[in-house]
Image: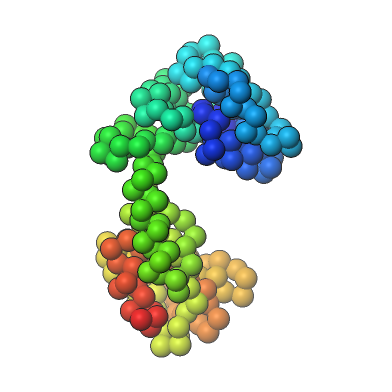
Amino acid sequence: MHIIIIGCGRVGSQAAAAFSRQGHSVVVIDRNPASFRRLPSAFVGTKIPGIAYDKETMEKAGIQQADALVAVTSGDNSNIVAARIAKEVYRVPIVLSRIYDPQRAEIYRRFGVTTFAPTVWGANRVVELVTSVELGQDISLGNGEVEMVRASAPPHLIGKPPGALNVPGEIAVAAIIRMGKAIIPVSGTRFEDGDELHVLVHRTAIEKLEKMMGLK
């Protein structure tokens, strides 16, 4: 993938380094060249000083061929302007923008820009990590409204269908890892001893899932 990171702060530099380690083509843009010092010496990618939403800067970064753009500067306005240009003008498939104001984040999602509000996301993660120690969190979606969690199939659910855990709008079994292989539940699927369950759960239903799993 060709990935453009706008903003070389703590989040941007770490994300750029991680993508680089995975072998992706990475370009980092920051108006302050000194910010590039945050990148590790092993970083393999391009560093471009410039304004994030400047047409010349974006095209120099290869936005016409970009598979993803991540805007994580310290300013909401800069992030969303760059993100919308990437999405609406250059049709970049994956666009992610950090927005500190949760209410604005919801508005921008309607434009097709994936956003995350660190304050809301962080608060939700703290609550979940403290209150849900029996469940392992894999992925947090949106601003933490929905989590993908994993847990071993409890004895009382062995032989039962995934529907025994499903609660419309709150809980859904997304996948089962069985003998090292992942399967998506279908009609006729039954839980087996040793299954590892990957479950989508709304943050308001974490305690409900724990009770259904017999963890509380």
Quarter of the picture containing the C terminus is bottom left
Residue 23, horizontal then vertical, whole percent:
69, 40
- Residue 112 found in image quarter: top left
- Residue 24 visible within the image: no
Residue 50, horizontal then vertical, whole percent:
54, 16
Q: Is residue 97 above or below residue 179?
A: above
Number of callouts in the render? Answer: 0
Q: Is residue 56 above or below residue 110?
A: above
Residue 37, horizontal then vertical, whole percent:
65, 29
Observer-nearest of 78 and 181:
78
Q: Residue drawn 39% across and 39% down?
A: 114
Furthest residue toward top: 56
Q: Residue drawn 43% across and 61% down?
A: 148
Residue 57, horizontal then vertical, whole percent:
54, 15
Give the colouring mode of the picture: rainbow
Q: Residue drawn 35% across and 37% down?
A: 100
Give left or right: position of 200 versus 205. Answer: right
- Residue 135 visible within the image: yes
Observer-nearest of 80 and 11:
11
Furthest residue toward right: 42
Give left or right: position of 61 versus 167. Answer: right
Quarter of the picture containing the N terminus is top right
Furthest residue toward bottom: 156
- Residue 210 found in image quarter: bottom left
